[in-house]
Image: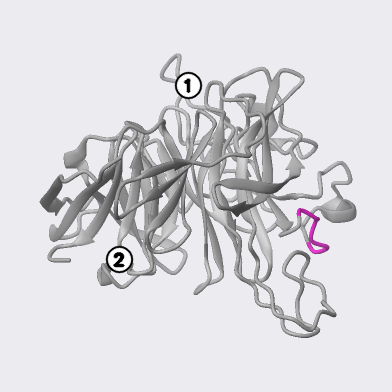
Amino acid sequence: MKRLPLMLTLLATLASIDSQAETCETYQLVRVAEGLGIPWGMALLDTNNLLVTERNGKLLKLDLTSGKQTNIKGLPAIHAKGQGGLLDIQLGPKITITGAGTDADTGKGSASGSNSKQSWIYFTYSKPVDGLGRTTLARAKLRGNQLLEWQDLLVTESGTDTGRHFGSRITFDDKGHLFFSIGDRGHRPNGQDLSTHAGSILRLNLDGSVPHDNPFVSGSHNKSHALPEIYSYGHRNPQGLTFDAKTQRLWSIEHGPRGGDEINLIKAGHNYGWPVVSFGKEYWGPFDVGEGTSKPGMEPPTKVYTPSIAPSSLLVYSGRAFTKWQGDLLSGALKLTHLNRVTLNGENATSEQRLLTELNERIRQVIEDEQGNLLISTDSGTIYRVNPCGV
């Protein structure tokens, strides 16, 4: 496929949602691919090559210079039904081992005298189990256009007969841990049930083992029935997850029902309330979901979106291309079709801006490249690059 020649130069006026002065930014929007299935996840292999997951169960490599698309083989069977399918993709941390250093898989000491680097690619997908889909964490290695050494690291306890709320996003901290999110699978009580992975954010070592300091290991917190992989719970459908290495904070963004989308600062062992507390309404009438908007022992959200924007993906921007955005949270909005930018002051959200409204596109994923330019994917099957004006 040839690279599409279209370049749209847009002068975007960003209306301030939180009553701050109106600002104006200039950027270029370049369409680099179109005609994809819903491009759910993206990960840069290098400057020119992008891996893209399609929710329908396909993986492709996109050459950002030429526009050429190459199918990648070696995926397992995928439950691509409803909101399930092939979901997120992330390159594993590149951990160098020298002598008796740190093992890239487990964090334990390695006796090897040679250097090596983490080469795994991590995926979440809905795995067919007994006719149902379960959100599953897996990893594999890429050789040419073929995935090798596929490993299902955790087939979660999250099967339901609905096609809803699989999650799921992946992120890494800088201490050898992986986090990934799972929705409540359309069954509200799952959010408060620690005997299921549904409605939770999980924390694992890179090889899929459970960290010894997870909050519910060995019946800690007096919850002996809790699954040890759970890091936080009380979530409805977190489709954005990102770790800020600079501040050592883990952030998520999740769908509420009718209203009540939330940005949450994730803390070990904390309960985020769903479905006991919520800012949303029932779909079938003007009635509040749950008992109220707060309750002792349940963590309040950092930010609430009412009406819902329907968020998907989350990024703490750290690049140099848009210096005013450094440290801000960027998220795609599906229902309200824009790129959402939230400015933070410590743990507090202070303002919101809505970008790329001109596209009128359901933005599914946003990542940044090494220069700090953005790559965004849309449910129409298009991928765009967002550069500062003049680049």
Is residue 278 or residue 91 the one in the foreground?
91
Camera-near label (1 vs 2) is 2
Is 247 located above or below residue 241 in the figure? below
Return the x and y of residue 366 as percentages of the image width and height.
38, 50
Segment colored magenta: 208-213
Place residue 35 in its image quadrant: top left
Q: Quadrant of the C terminus?
A: bottom left
Q: Residue at x 54, y 65 (%)?
A: 249
Q: Residues within 10 Å of mark 1 (few under 14, many from 20)?
A: few
Q: Which percent across, then down, holds residue 383?
A: 32, 44
Does 188 sit left or right of 51 as displayed?
Answer: right
Majority secondary structure of the magenta segment?
Answer: loop
Residue 298 seen from this side: no
Tell me the residue that label 2 is attached to.
325
Question: Disc 1 marks which amino acid?
Answer: Glu
Q: Is residue 47 magenta?
A: no
Q: Is residue 28 visible?
A: yes
* Marker count (numbered): 2
Residue displayed at 67% across by 49% down: 139
Counting from the top left corner in percent of width and height, residue 274 is at 60, 36
Q: Say above or below: 87 vs 375.
A: above
Q: Quadrant of residue 38?
A: top left
- Name the foreground residue: 153 vs 72: 72
Q: Residue at x 75, y 64 (%)?
A: 105
Cα–Cα gap, marks 1 and 2: 35 Å
Q: Report the residue marked by disc 1.
A: 282
Q: Going by the picture, which residue comes out furthest to the front?
A: 144
Q: Is 130 on the left-hand or right-hand side of 68?
A: right
